Image (tube, coloured by chain):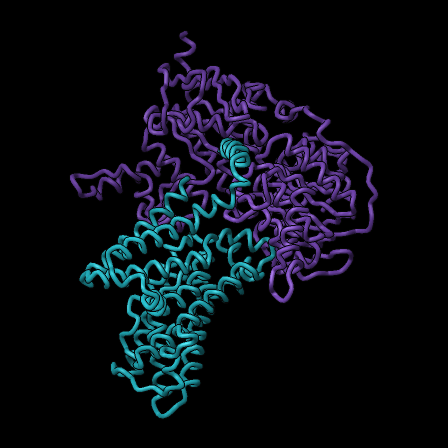
Chain colours: A cyan, B purple
Amino acid sequence: MTEKRTVDEEQQGQQGAGKRGARGVLTRFLTGTGPILGAWLLLCVVLAAFAPNFLEFDNFTQIVVQSAVIGIAAVGMTFVIITGGIDLSVGSVVALTGMLAGISMQDGGSGIVGILVALGAGLLIGCFNGFSTTFLGITPFIVTLAVLSMARGLTLAVSKGQTVYGFPPSFTFVGQAEILGVSLLVWLTLAVFAIGYVTLSRTVFGHQVYAIGGNMEAARLAGIPVRRVSFLVYAIAGLCAGLSAVVLTSRLDSALPSAAEGLELQVIAAVVIGGTSLFGGRGNMVGTLVGVLLIGTLNNGLTLLNVPPFWVQFVQGVVIFLAVLIDALNRRR
Amino acid sequence: MSEMQDAALVMEGIDKHFPGVHALKGVNLRIEPGQVMGIVGENGAGKSTLIKVLAGAYLPEAGRIIVNGEPLEANNPADALAAGITVIYQELSLVPGMSVAENIFLGDMPSRGPFLEQRQVREMARELLARVGLDDLSTGAPVGSLRLGVRQLIEVAKALHRDARILVMDEPTSALQRSEVDLLFDVVRGLRDEGISIIYVSHHLEEVFEICDAATVMRDGAVVGSKPIGEWTMDSLVQAMVNKRLDTLFPRRERERGEVALEVRNLTLDPSVRDVSFQVREGEILGLAGVVGAGRTETLKAISGVTPADGGEILVKNRERKVRSARDGLDAGIVYMPEDRGAEGLVYSATINENLVLSVLNRISRAGFVEGGKYRSLGQRLKERFGVRASSVRQEVGELSGGNQQKVVLARAMATDPTVVLLDEPTRGIDVGAKSEIYEYMLEIAAGGGAVVMVSSEFPELLGMADRIAIMRNGRTVAEIAGSEADQEMILEYATSGAEPGNVEADG
C-alpha cells in the first residue's frame, strides 16, 4: 500500500511538474477566484439586459450598502473557515451586540458608547468561541451552535422581546453619512476587506492561518502556535460581527430582537462561493468580496426584476449549491 | 498434480509491478491445511503487497492462486473472502461503538425480514467466541471498551463466522502484551488443529519460531527461502532477510566530533519511552534501531517537544532546556523531521515556498508583516540548496514526488539553523536517487557540526549512515553499538529477542 501510493505520487508529481509552473498563476486564478468573478460579471450582464435601472451608479452603491452587514461578517468568517473551523453564531451575535448597543444608548448615551459596546461585546463572544474550541477542545460547529442559541436567547431576554429604537445622530451617522457622495458604509466595507486582505496575505498571522487549515499537525510541528492563532480567528470573527451589528443597527435606527436571523448561512455561503474551502487551507479575501457581491447582486437583481421574495431564497440556494459543487469538482481533479 | 490438491493454498509465479517498482517477482508459496506459515522480511520486501494480492485488493499481472485445488480469480476482496481467505490487518477493522456480536456479524446479521434474530445472534456469537477462547465475554459489550488483545481475537471470531480456511495475520502482536500474545497463540494452535491454515506475518522472529510450522523469507519482492521451522535458525533466518546491497550508497567519511550537542537523561514518555538516556556529539550521526512500537518515534517526538516528555532532562550543548512544545524545541535548536510527511510534515494545499519558510516566518518579517522579498529569496535559496525539483517555488507541494516532498521537509528543518536534527525514517517511500541525495545532505549536516539522530527501519541505511547505533526494545535502549562493529544480525537479535550476546559497548 505504502509502496503503491508513493509510486503513484511520484508519477503525478513528475507530470505535474512539467505541466504547471509558468501557467501556474493563471491556473490557480482559473480554479480559484476566476470562475466566480466570471459568474458575477455574467450575472451583471444578464441583469443589465433585463433590469432597466441595474447599471446605474446608485444601484451599485446600493448593492454594496445592502451587502455591508454580510460583507463585514464574511471577512471574519473567511479567517475562521481557512483554519478549517466554522462560526455559526454570527447572526445571533449581530443581534445581541446590536441590542446591547441600543440599550446602552437608550438613556441618552452617546453613539461612541454604543459603538464600543457592540465591538466589545462581539470581541468578547468571539473570545469565548475561540477559548472553547482551542483550549477546551470542543468542536467549533457545536460551540458556535450553542452560542448561536445563547446569544439569541440573551437578545430576547435583555430586550424583553421589544424593539429598541431612537438613537443619537452620533450613532446613526454610520449608516447615513456620505463621503465624496458615496455612503460611508461602502467605504467602511471596503476598508474592512482591505484590512482583512492585508492581514491574511501579508502578515505572519495570515500565513499561520493558512498553514493551520492546510494541515494542523504539520503546522504544530513546524512551531506555529496553533492554539493562539485558532483562538484569534474566532476573536476576529466576533469583532467583525460586532461591527456588522453597528452597521445594521445604525442603518435601521433600531435594534430588533429578531435581527440578522439566518445571517450566518448567508455569510458562510458568501465565503464558500468565494472559493474558500470548508476543509480549510484554501481561500482568499478577494474571493470572499466577490462572493458577497454575487449574493448582494443576486438579491438586488431579483428585486429589480420583481421576483417574489420566496423565490429569492430558492435561487440563492441554487447558487450556493453550484458554488460548492464547483469546489467539490475542483477538489477531485 | 495430486500434491497441488493437498495444499490449502498455492501461489505460483505471482508478479506485480507498480510504476517504477517490481513489487513481487514471481513469488511461489505453498501452505498445507493446518499449517502456520510465518512470512518474514525487511520493510519493503513485498510482504504487504503479497497479502494484498491474497486479499484480492491487488490484481497480480502474472501467476495463479489455487485454493484447495481450485484456481482463484480474486478480482476484489469479496472474491477472496468467498474463497475462505480472510486477512486481519494491523489496524483492526472493528467498529468501536458497536457490540461484540454486532461486530462479528457486521454486514451479515442473522435476521428475519427487517428484524434481527436477537437470540440466534447471541447464541452464534457465543459459539464463535468460545472457539477463540473468549467464553466469558459478554456479546453485548461495546468493542471500544475492550483491550486490544481481546479485539484481535474478536477479529478472528469474525473471520471464523465467514468460514475462513486461510487466515492471514499481519503483525498481530505488535501492540499486544505478553499475556495477550500467549492467549492469541493458544487460539492459533486451536485453529491449526481444526485444519485452518494460518499465514503469520511478523517482525518478531522469536514469535515466528514459537508459533510457526514453517517460515518463508522475502527479500526485494522475491521469496528467497521457504522451509519447515526446524530447518531455520535465528541466524540463517536473519541472514536470508538481510540483503547485501549497495554499500556504495553510503560514502563513509571521517568527520570531526565536537562537543556533546545533545544529551538526554532518563527521558520518559508514558507508555512508550522509559528511562532513555544517550548523548550525541556535534558531527555525529546516532542511529535508533528497533522494531515497530519499540518507542523510537516517540523518543524523537519527546526530545523535540512535539509530544512533551513526562520526565527526564534534555540538554543542548550542556544547557538544560525545557521543551514543552515544538516551538520550544526549535528555540532550543532541536528540529524534528516527522516520519509521515503527508500527515505531519507538509501543508499540501500550500506552495513549496510557503512550506519552506513555515518555521522561520518570524525571521523574514518585520512588525508582524512578512517581507515579500525575503520570503521569496529564502524560499528560492532553500529550494536550490536542497535540490527540490519543481518548476517554481509557487508550485503546490502536494504535486511533488515523494522524494522532492521529503527534501522540502528537510530544507524547512534546516532553515531553522538547528544544533540537533532528529530524522524519523528520512527516506521512507522515496526512490533510490532521492535517497542518496538525502544521505548526502545528512552527511553534510553532520560535517557542518550538526548532531543527527536518525530512526530507520532499513538496516542498510542504518548501518551505512550511523556512527553509533542505539537499539530500543519496549521503550528502553537495550544496547549501543559502534556503527563499524554493528551488523544486521546483531541489531535484530537485540531488537527482538532480548538475547545478550557479547560486543556490548554500553547499556542505556
Q: Foreground residue, B9 or A235?
A: A235
- The residue that appears at 55% across and 19% down in the rendered structure is B226
Residue A271: tell me if it is visible. Answer: yes
Q: Position of residue A288 (x, y in %)?
A: 41, 59
Image quadrant containing the C terminus of chain A: top left
Q: Position of residue B195 (x, y in %)?
A: 39, 23
Q: Residue furthest top?
A: B1
**On screen, A251 above or below B189?**
below
Q: Position of residue B105 (x, y in %)?
A: 30, 39
**On screen, B419 above or below B101?**
below
Give the mark count: 0
Q: Foreground residue, A80 or B284?
A: A80
Q: Position of residue B54 (x, y in %)?
A: 43, 25
Residue B269: tell me if it is visible. Answer: no
Q: Foreground residue, B57 or A111?
A: A111
Q: Foreground residue, B17 or B233?
A: B17
Q: Quadrant of residue B91?
A: top left
**On screen, A246 above or below A299?**
below
Q: Residue furthest left?
A: B113
- The residue that appears at 42% across and 56% down in the rendered structure is A287
Left or right, A52 with reference to B21: left
- The residue that appears at 44% across and 75% down in the rendered structure is A124
